[in-house]
Amino acid sequence: MNNSSSVLNGIDTTRVLGNIDGSKNSPTVVIFAGIHGNEIAGVKAAKIVLHKIKENNISFKGNLYVLLGNIKALKNNIRFEDLDLNRIWNKENITANINNDRVNFSELSEQKEIYAKIKSIMQNNNGPFYFIDLHTTSAHSVPFITISDSLNNRRFSRKFPLPVVLGIEEYLDGPLLTFINEFGHIALGFEGGQHHDEGSVANCEAFIWKALVHSKCVSKKNIPDYKKYKNHLANLCCKYDFFEIIYRYALEDGEHFIMNPGFKNFEPVKKHQLLAKSGGLPIIANKNSRIFMPLYQEQGEDGYFLLSKISKFWLNSSIVVRRLKINHFLRLIPGVNKDPDNNYTLIVDPKIAKYMTKEIFHLFGYRKQIFKDDKFHFIKRDRNKTEMI
């Protein structure tokens, strides 16, 4: 096992915090910690896990890589320096970045290094690959999982006794895991709790151990006190429901936004309930829902999100229609066409789209919606595995 040794202000400054090399054909888990520089719990938890693996000489069947995220921001304990590192991951940005020797923003340099490490890991291993991104929130929260809505992500996320949130890629541009998911790999975000709550470190540690077991990198019988980690997560949440994002309050540049104090993730809110103020004016909930990721820090682009619970009937129905590949019948509808340049995209005439609710496209696995060239583009989340660009 290899551990980084360069440390500044308590933060390791090498990109690879630690790694364990198994065989090329065994499962590979890649953990990202500190993508946001003020979210240190994941870094601490990963270091604890790496130390315990070495200290207890735990037999490892797979490969493990722990990559640090925004190293400069971690040193300064801020979310980011110039750009949010979790909002710049798309093919256009990466292609431009890797071909540019001069970068104007700190996060572009970080992205370039992280991307190179991911490419190297995938070239030297055959998988299957599991990507885990560790985060914390500014609001108090039970731990939860965020995923792009692919069936392989759903299957893996159900192995954890935690709430699962779908659809964040519909409201955010450029998250790291959404980019990785486009190449068919399992990619889960884990939110371990509030930034400064020491319990968040324990939550992240328990999640890492379970991820290593469920990916078959290590047997649970080889982990001392594994039952403790398993029960730790199970005891934190009483409901393991699926939720989807139905609304995002996006902040404008220079907006004076103040979230009402005391909100916790998944807390029910009523229609017309006061949630925040912008420039002294009230912001109210537009429907009965649940609050999600309310902003209680200076940096950030999202004031809050609203969630709704997804019924088991809808979840099961979507599994059936996707496995039977019934989505191909959507192309028979006048005004709905396959993108000639992308097999995972449907191009829909706005006149037709207004008669087809977003939920219909969700059912068939099309989550991301983009409007360009006077047409709606719906992008499918279930993907075959392909080589990363």
Image (tube, rainbow, N blue to C red):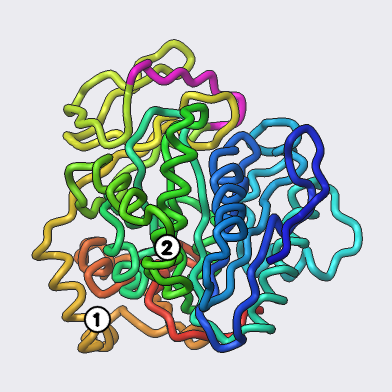
Q: Which quadrant: the N terminus?
A: bottom right
Residue 110 spot, x, y in % from top left: 75, 53
Main SS category, magenta section: loop
Count neighbours of disc 2 (C-alpha within 10 A) and say few if under 14, some if 14 to 19, many if 20 or more.
many
Residue 30 horizontal/vertical position (percent): 57, 66
Q: Which residues are magenta?
A: 252-262
Residue density around tag 1, few if under 14, some if 14–19, many if 20 or more, within 10 Å = some
| Mark linked to residue 322 | 1
Percent position of residue 149, x then y: 34, 66
Say if 233 sits above or below 177 in the image: above
Give the x, y percent position of residue 163: 27, 49
Q: Residue at x 52, y 72 (%)?
A: 59
Based on the picture, tell me whether residue 176 belongs to the magenta stretch.
no
Q: Which mark is residue 211?
A: 2
Could you say which quadrant of the image residue 18 lies in? bottom right
- Camera-side residue of 94 and 131: 131
Mark pair 2, 1: CA separation: 26 Å
Q: Amino acid at mark 1?
A: Arg
Side of 257 where 145 appears, left or right: left
Determine the secondary structure under disc 1.
Answer: helix
Left or right position of 282 against 15: left
- Frontmost residue, 366 versus 264: 264
Farthest right residue in view: 101
Q: Classify mark 2: helix, strand or loop.
A: helix
Labelled disc at residue 376: none
